[in-house]
Image (tube, helix red, strand yellow):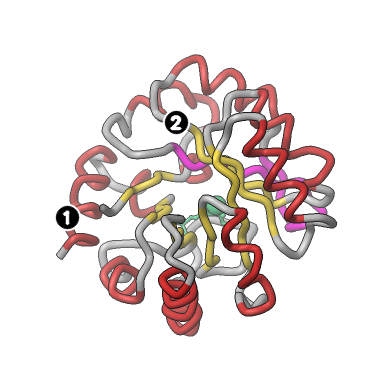
Amino acid sequence: MAQINPSILSADFARLAEEAKAVDGADWLHVDVMDNHFVPNLTLGTPVVESLSRVTDTPLDCHLMIEEPDRWAPAYVEAGAGSVTFHAEAAAAPVRLAREIRAKGARASMALKPATPIEPYEDLLPELDMLLVMTVEPGFGGQAFLDIMLPKIRRTRQLIEKHGLQMWLQVDGGVSASTIERCAEAGADVFVAGSAVYGADDPAAAVRALREQARS
Ligand code: DX5
Ligand code: ZN
């Protein structure tokens, strides 16, 4: 079943509560945390996640584009995230970190930048509830979808099936009406969309339309 996670990176940060409500019906609200070190952009931290969790019933999917996730990720579970994604490139001990996130009660997820292959992480997959294949270089919304990531999505889906896992496969970056079908066909089942949702006149309708497209 396709899940659509609007990214509030493309929302109006001065009106976050309203912007969260504007996508009622979305599966998760995708919250991009950036620290100006792992990526060249700075967004928000645990206080905003905590406030957001109080104003929306949509569960929060926190994507940590930060250095030292081993140190900071658990605080995002405490702040109210239902799913926490750390980057493979930044984690010192991804297995320990995933176990800690799960033990605290959230879904544990790991992200791969475009140049990071999935193969070295095959044995770690059972420790994760979701794998995120980035389809742009992380850091900014509104970038063009990288078609060259489709083979990695396909190979990741094959590995998930090979191991008989129930985990989710998320794509993030440039996902829109014109690219979502390719992602779904390659095996993704969780779709992050920033500009395609918040750039639309009716964000909730955009979520429904994307979900329909991902199914077809
Ligand atoms: C990019 C972020 C994405 C971003 C996606 O680094 O991780 O979540 O918000 O935005 P779009 O959908 O506009 O590419
Ligand atoms: Zn993201």
Viewer-side residue, 172 vs 167: 167
Q: Position of residue 109 (x, y in %)?
A: 58, 51
Q: Which residue is mark 2?
A: 59
Q: How many numbered discs sit on the rendered protein?
A: 2
**What amino acid is labelled 1 in the image?**
Glu
Q: Position of residue 115 (x, y in %)?
A: 66, 79
Q: Which residues are magenta?
A: 29-43
Residue 168 sits in which quadrant?
Answer: bottom left
- Residue ID at (35%, 59%): 189
Relative placement, left or right, of 215 versus 133 is left
Magenta segment includes 210: no
Dominant secondary structure of the magenta stretch?
loop
Task: Classify 39 as above or below 105.
Answer: below
Q: Is mark 1 within 8 Å of ligand 1?
A: no
Q: Position of residue 4 (x, y in %)?
A: 34, 48
Q: Quadrant of the C terminus?
A: bottom left
Task: Classify 158 as above or below 36.
Answer: below
- Residue ID at (23%, 52%): 211
The disc at residue 212 is 1
**What amino acid is labelled 2 in the image?**
Pro
Q: Position of residue 52 (x, y in %)?
A: 53, 23
